[in-house]
Amino acid sequence: MMNASTLFINERLQKRAAQGLLRKLPLQQCLTDFCSNDYLGFSRSESLKTKIFKAQQIHQGMSLGATGSRLLTGNSRFAERLEADLAADHQVEAALLFNSGYTANLALFSCLPQKGDTVIIDELIHSSVIDGCRLSFSNRIKFKHNDLQSLEEKIKRAKGSCYVAVESVYSMDGDLSPLLAIAALCKTYGALLIVDEAHAFGVFGRGLVHFSNLTRNVFAVVITFGKALGAHGAAVLGSQALRSYLVNFARPFIYSTAMPFSNLLQLQISFRFLQDNAQLQQELQRKIFLFQQCMSPNPVIETLQSPIQAIILSGNEKVKAVSRELADEGLAVYPILSPTVPKGMERLRICLHIFNTDQEIEKLSSTLLKAINTHE
């Protein structure tokens, strides 16, 4: 006989399967990549691979594993130099490395706000921020996406210390946060602004906080290395006091095995490669504009454009059908289904990269427009 837990698991899985929402782990297919977060192509860069290989030959004596947390055996001068380099480049006092962006947000938001404090989050903020807030026992309030009036109303209601959390580039819609206006609101009401730059770091230089000259107006910034840097890990940027606080109170940091040296070395080389190849960002902007031109004869021209292009196709079955037709033409574009996004806001999440040729982008656009018309 099955026990209660097994019955519960099976019932939940069967229900999800009946709804057509059962998640499975996909295997890599030989399709043209329009879905990964490898915006600058670092994960496949032969030039970068060569640099990393040469650096590995210099450090052949380094151990394979970290063997413990940073507070035990996992710390090194190399890790601290990397953190110092990141901090100096972003013009902040300090940086602290984490194993992933999820872990960084979980750590920051679980230990920083206290019971009785308030965290005001954009309604489209990443789940890692929400999960961190849940662990903190603080008051969590959502404001309407990129809506300054809604944010101000929520700040006025805040109790205790008030933190405002936003993404500079939102991962599902690809739109940009009005950081200047949000920072001004936070300054007016004494709220502390925290910005997740996961999809902006590297794509827009050091990120939109630095681009907007807001470094002194932001309490903490989270950058991740799994997108534009093509690597793995993350860092929280801020004051030296914040770094020390996280080392002492952030449980995901304290109780996690540190990054191995091989990962730290890749991050160092990739970070320098990013600094030395600013032209890649201009090339990515050109690719984005080409896609918009192909999709519309009169695209909206903005100063900055995100490589994430959301094509809203209401209904899970419709968006899955269009995704399959694109795959049949050798194009990898994955559907984003409800409940991951709100019902009626299902979409194709297209990610553009510098390695996508102009011909591939033109093929994507024409195939996509044809498929959309077929399913109208």
Image (cartoon, rainbow, N blue to C red):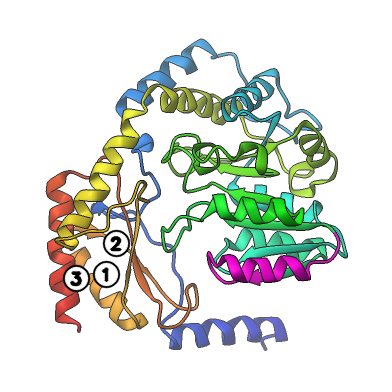
Quarter of the rendering occupied by the N terminus: bottom right
Identify the residue at horizontal 60%, vertical 55% (top origin).
Answer: 182
Q: Amino acid at mark 1?
A: Ser
Q: Is residue 225 left or right of residue 326?
A: right
Mark 1 lies on residue? 323
Q: Position of residue 17 (x, y in %)?
A: 45, 83
Q: Amino acid at mark 3?
A: Glu
Queried whether the magenta region covers residue 31, the answer comes back as no
Instruction: Confirm or deny contact between disc 1 and disc 3 (CB under 8 A).
Output: yes
Q: Which element carries disc 1, helix, strand or loop? A: helix
Q: Which of the two labelled residues, at mark 2 and mark 3, occupies the earlier sequence position? A: 3
Q: Amino acid at mark 2?
A: Val
Q: Provide the residue span drawn in magenta.
A: 142-160
Q: Is residue 189 left or right of residue 330?
A: right
Mark 2 lies on residue? 333
Which one is nearer the viewer's eye here, 294 or 213?
213
Q: Residue furthest top?
A: 58
Identify the residue at horizontal 64%, vertical 30% (top origin).
Answer: 65
Mark 3 lies on residue? 325
Instruction: Confirm or deny contact between disc 2 and disc 1 (CB under 8 A).
Output: yes
Q: Is residue 340 left or right of residue 239?
A: left
Residue 74, compared with residue 246, is above or below; it is above
Quarter of the rendering occupied by the C terminus: bottom left
Residue 143 location, quadrant:
bottom right
Residue 27, compared with residue 369, is above or below; it is above
**In 3D space, how far apart are the residues under numbered discs 1 and 3 (Cα atoms)?**
5 Å
Q: Position of residue 299 (x, y in %)?
A: 22, 59
Residue 312 location, quadrant:
bottom left
Identify the residue at horizontal 55%, vertical 27% (top origin).
Answer: 262
